[in-house]
Image: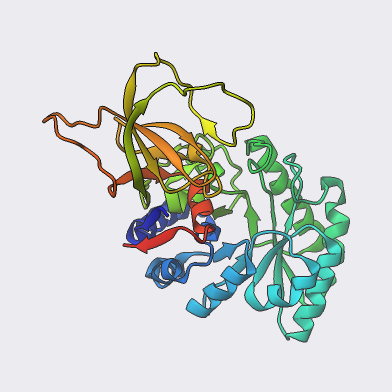
Amino acid sequence: MADLIVNTKKITRNIEKLDKYLKAYNAKWTLVTKILSGDRRLLEPILNHPIIENLHSVGDSRLSSLRTIKKINPDIQTMYIKPPVQSLVKTVVQCADISLNSSFSTIEALNEEARRQDKIHKVVIMVELGELREGILRENIVDFYQRVFNLDHIETIGLGSNLGCMYGVEPTYDKLIQLSLYKELLESKFNRKLEIISGGSSITLPLISKKKVPPAMNHYRIGEAAFVGTSPFDGKKFRDLSVDAFNVAANIIELEQKEVVPDGNIGEGNIGHTSEFSGDETEKSYRAIVDFGSIDVDVDELFIKDKYINFLGTTSDMTVYDLGKNLNQGNRTRYKVGDQIKLIPSYMAVARFMNSKFTEVKVK
C-alpha cells in the first residue's frame, strides 16, 4: 500500500502562523484535527507543542479522537464540531467541553448528563444561513436561546454558522453580519454576553484581512489551512503556509512499455476511471502501476510532483501513470519496479488515506 509521510513540524509551523494571523484581528480559533483520524503518533507532537496553549480549543468530529486528545493533554479545551447523537451524550460530556448544537432535545439530554457528571457543558448554537446543513431557523433563535438559557448545566457561549461545506454557499459579509445582529439582539434581551461568534472554517480565512467579515466575528474552526496550507475559498495556498506537510509515496508494482490505445471493444462494464486517451495503435509509452486505487482515495485529489508523469487510470485497488519514455536527460532509466511515485494529497485525500487501514503512515 502507499505510504503517507507526515511532517508534524511543518504542521506546527502552520499553526503558529495561523495563530499570529488571527490574533492580529482579535480572533480566537479552534484547531480541527479530524483529518488525523485520531492517530496518536501525529496528535502527540502537535498537541504537546507550546503553541496549542494559545488556542481557544481543539475540535474533532469523532468522539474517539476527542478521547485520545484528552488523554494526550487533559488541559486542552475540546470541541465536538457537529450536533451530537442523543444516545452518545454521556461520551460527549466526558470528552468534549463544548459542542455545536441545533436541536433543543439534544441540549436537554446534554444538560441531564452534565448534571449527572457534575459538569457545566458549553454549547454553541448553530444558525442556518443558507447552506442547508446544521442550524436552527433564524426566526426561531430568540425562543430557542431562551429555552437553552434556562438549563442549569448548560452554558451557551456563542452562535455559529457553517458555510461552504455542502452546497458551497460563500461566507459573505451580508451572510455573516446576520450572526452579529443576532448576538446584539440576544445580549440585549437577556442581558448576557456571548463569548464567541464562530464564523466558519478555513474558507473564511482570506476574507479576514480584506475586512470582508464583520468585526464581531471572533472565532473560526480551522482544519484544512492548518494541515495542508490551503483555503477552500479558492483552493490555493493561503499566505505563507506549508502545503507539503503530507506526501504520498506510491509503490510501483509493475512497469512495462505498452500501447497507449486499449485493444478491443470498449464496453460499459468497466469499474475504472480513466483520462482521455488518444494516439495511434502503434504508439507506446511506459506505464507504471502503483498500489492504491479508488477505494483508498479520489485520484483527482492527488497532485503529481514529477511534471513528466501523467495520470492514466484507476481501478478499485491499482492506479496507472504514464511515464512516457522513462528516460532522463542522460538517457538513463528514471523509474523501475520498486521505486515510488511522489504525490501531494489534498485535504480530502489525506483524510481518506488516514481512514484507510491499508495506508502506511510514517511520521517525520
Q: Nearer the viewer, residue 85 or 279?
A: 279
Asked if residue 35 is positioned above or below residue 47 in the image, the reply reads: above
Residue at figure coordinates x 82%, y 60% from the top left: 103
Question: Which quadrant of the figure has residue 4?
Answer: bottom left
The coloring applied to the image is: rainbow
Residue at figure coordinates x 45%, y 21% from the top left: 277
Question: Which quadrant of the figure has residue 47?
Answer: bottom left
**Which residue sits furthest left?**
330
Question: Which quadrant of the figure has residue 193?
Answer: bottom right
Residue 174 position within the rendered picture, expressed as x and y whole percent measured from the top left: 68, 35
Q: Is 214 on the left-hand or right-hand side of 313?
A: right
Residue 187 position within the rendered picture, expressed as x and y whole percent measured from the top left: 75, 58
**Which residue sits furthest top?**
280
**Which residue sits furthest front?**
264
Residue 225 position within the rendered picture, expressed as x and y whole percent measured from the top left: 47, 48
Quarter occupied by the N terminus = bottom left
Q: Nearer the viewer, residue 141 or 235?
A: 235
Total labels: the figure holds 0
Asked if residue 223 can be seen in this view, the reply is no
Quarter occupied by the C terminus = bottom left
Q: Nearer the viewer, residue 165 or 287?
A: 287
Residue at figure coordinates x 77%, y 51% from the top left: 135
Asked if residue 179 can be seen in this view, the reply is yes
Asked if residue 285 is positioned above or below residue 32 in the image, the reply reads: above
Residue at figure coordinates x 69%, y 49% from the top left: 161
Residue 325 position within the rendered picture, expressed as x and y whole percent measured from the top left: 25, 27
